[in-house]
Image (cartoon, rainbow, N blue to C red):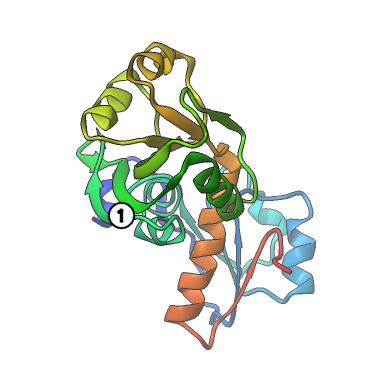
Amino acid sequence: MGAAAYPDDINGIYRPSCRPIRRLGLLLDPEPSLPDWVTIHQLDALWLHRPWKLDALLLPSDIGVLAYHLAFDEHLTLGFNPHLATALGMADLEALGEKAGRCIGMIGTIAPQDMAAYCRQVMAVFNGVEEIRCSNSSSRIVTRVAVVGAMTATLIQDAYERQVDLYITGQFRVSATAAVAATGMDVIAVGHRRSEQWGLNALAKIVRARWPELQVLSWPEQA
């Protein structure tokens, strides 16, 4: 499913340019010091997740800009994301949830391990988490995990009926509290920004692998 599945969103060329691209910068938002970053690193083009506050007049006139919003969220953060599934040790992926005909989550199996150990793995993948709500013992064995870019009572119930032990999302939603209590579902909210940063780092790796001659920098710059 490509950008055509997001007809009302920003997908693709946000600011055209004929300049050859040798150095590409990736960032989530147009930071105040972006013009300096572009100049220092001699960037030829930018990729932005949220371009709305970009003041293009502060950039050289031939700097092209690509922008993807929902497509990035649903495919490289907490949606049906095989790249993230690999990082989390998930296999045998199944779709979970739908929005406008698009899948917004996934369920996968993991090697059996206790909840405490798997929580540590999730924290390592995302460089921390926002919140962990475990209704059961930390020694509970986890074998089925859901990763979803939303949290509703319906999604929690669907995950429970499909034998999910742990639900990973961006933010814990109060509206789903009753469903969490009723099903005994354990939940990790990694934080929206953390999930986006993971996706940005993943995008950098994908672009480098696809175009090895291209120099790719991401903000914040990776050590």
* Residue 116 image-quadrant placement: top right
In this rendered view, identify the residue nearer to me: 72 or 179. 179
Position of 132 relative to 174 (above/below): below
Position of 70 relative to 160 (above/below): below
The residue lying at 55 percent from left, 39 percent from top is 190
Number of marks in the image?
Answer: 1
The residue lying at 66 percent from left, 50 percent from top is 30
- Dot 1: element: helix
* Quadrant that contains the C terminus: bottom right
In this rendered view, identify the residue nearer to me: 32 or 168. 168
Which residue is labeled 1 in the image? Answer: 3
The residue lying at 48 percent from left, 40 percent from top is 115
Q: Is residue 46 visible?
A: yes
Q: Amino acid at mark 1?
A: Ala
The answer to whether 160 appears left or right of 43 in the picture is: left
The residue lying at 31 percent from left, 40 percent from top is 104
How far across and down, in percent of the image, does residue 164 sit? Answer: 31, 36
How far across and down, in percent of the image, does residue 214 sit? Answer: 55, 82
How far across and down, in percent of the image, does residue 158 sit? Answer: 24, 28
In the rendered image, the residue lying farthest to the bottom is: 213
How dense is the environment of label 1, judged by Cα within 10 Å: few (below 14), some, or many (20 and up)? some
In this rendered view, identify the residue nearer to me: 88 or 64. 88
In the rendered image, the residue lying farthest to the front is: 139
Position of 178 relative to 151 (above/below): above
* Residue 193 image-quadrant placement: top right
* Quadrant that contains the N terminus: bottom left
How far across and down, in percent of the image, does residue 159 sit? Answer: 28, 32
Q: Is residue 50 visible?
A: no
